[in-house]
Image: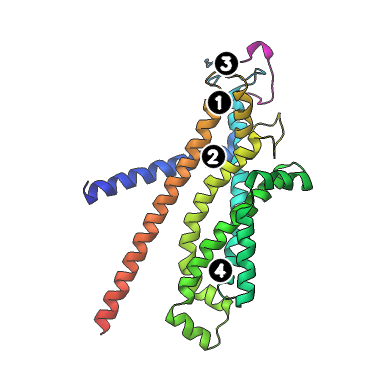
Amino acid sequence: MSRSDQSRSGAWTVRLALGLVAIVAVLAVAGPALAPYDPLAQDTALALHGSSPAHLLGTDYLGRDVLSRLLAGAPASLLSALAAALIGLLVGALPGALSAFLPRPAEWLALRVVDALLALPFILFAIVFAALLGNGLVQATTAIGLLIAPGFFRISRAATLRVRDAQYVEAATLLGASAWWVLGRHAWRQVAPTLVVAGISALGSALLAVASLTFLGIGVQPPAPTWGGMLASDLGYLAQRPEGPLAPALAIVLTVGALNLLADAVRDRTGAARVRHRAGANRKETADV
């Protein structure tokens, strides 16, 4: 495949990912308003019916419209994943960058805390967290954010270490520059693109985590609709309605896939931009010589 073909294929992939992410963003904001029926309205006479003009995705075991529940459950699933990713970014990124400038004992302690968080069983930690603070969406979102934070910590620390070891940063440090000054002036320019890619990927991971917890009944309690909760309830009626879990499963898979495609595209673009920047800097240095 030629470079032009690869470029066209990459552009098409980016447009597809952006289109899916845009649809997901609309659902996260206006999903309940787009629902054709009340997502909690029950009609047992219509239970487990297949697709029809009146109910495009059919009905569940209580006769509730599946499309309405899918749209109404989008905000709880998507916005909680966004909140969890933001918590992980805030809790992990800045401490990770600052850890590169800590004294050795403090640096060792910070790394051991991060290793301990990475070693925690995810589901068990979320269950214990919900048991201690209450079974709610805020508690589940916070638990997911705390478990995502070590990833941001390591990414931010690794990017900052590369900047810290640069000669111009060492010179600035010898002249009395503080860690905050180095971070604000030099490090964040290198760390930010990496964190953007990691943040988009973390959104997909957080959505899977939210779906897993709501599948187990943690975070949002029935009858409130969530994609994970719908998947759990539909699995109990596969014999009567085999296509039941398809709608929430596709919603989760397509959203996570779109976010991963977008993260790959952003990573490729930022990587290419860095190469062009370095090449331009090298040409400038050669011309100056």
Q: Is residue 245 left or right of residue 125?
A: left
Please indicate whether residue 5 sits to the left or right of residue 65 in the image. left
Type of the residue with mark 4: Ala
The first of marks 4 and 1 along the sequence is 4
Q: Is residue 37 magenta?
A: yes
Q: Which mark is residue 97?
A: 4
**How packed is label 3: few (under 14 Cα within 10 Å), some, or many (20 or more)?**
few
Write down the residue under mark 2: 26
Q: Is residue 173 above or below residue 36?
A: below
* Quadrant including the C terminus: bottom left
Q: Which residue is disc 3 drawn over?
A: 239
Which of pointers 2 and 4 indicates the residue nearer the eye?
A: 4
Give the mark, 2 or 3, whose residue is nearer the N terminus.
2
**Distance from the alpha carbon under mark 4 to that under mark 1:** 42 Å
Magenta residues span 32-49
Which residue, as the protein is rendered here, is positioned at the far bottom?
Answer: 175
Q: Of helix, strand and loop, which one carries label 3?
A: loop
Question: Closer to us: mark 1 or mark 3?
Answer: 3
| 71 magenta-colored | no
> Label 1: which residue?
245
259 or 99: which is nearer to us? 99
Q: Earlier in the sequence, mark 4 or mark 3?
A: 4
Q: How does the figure colour the protein chain or chains? A: rainbow
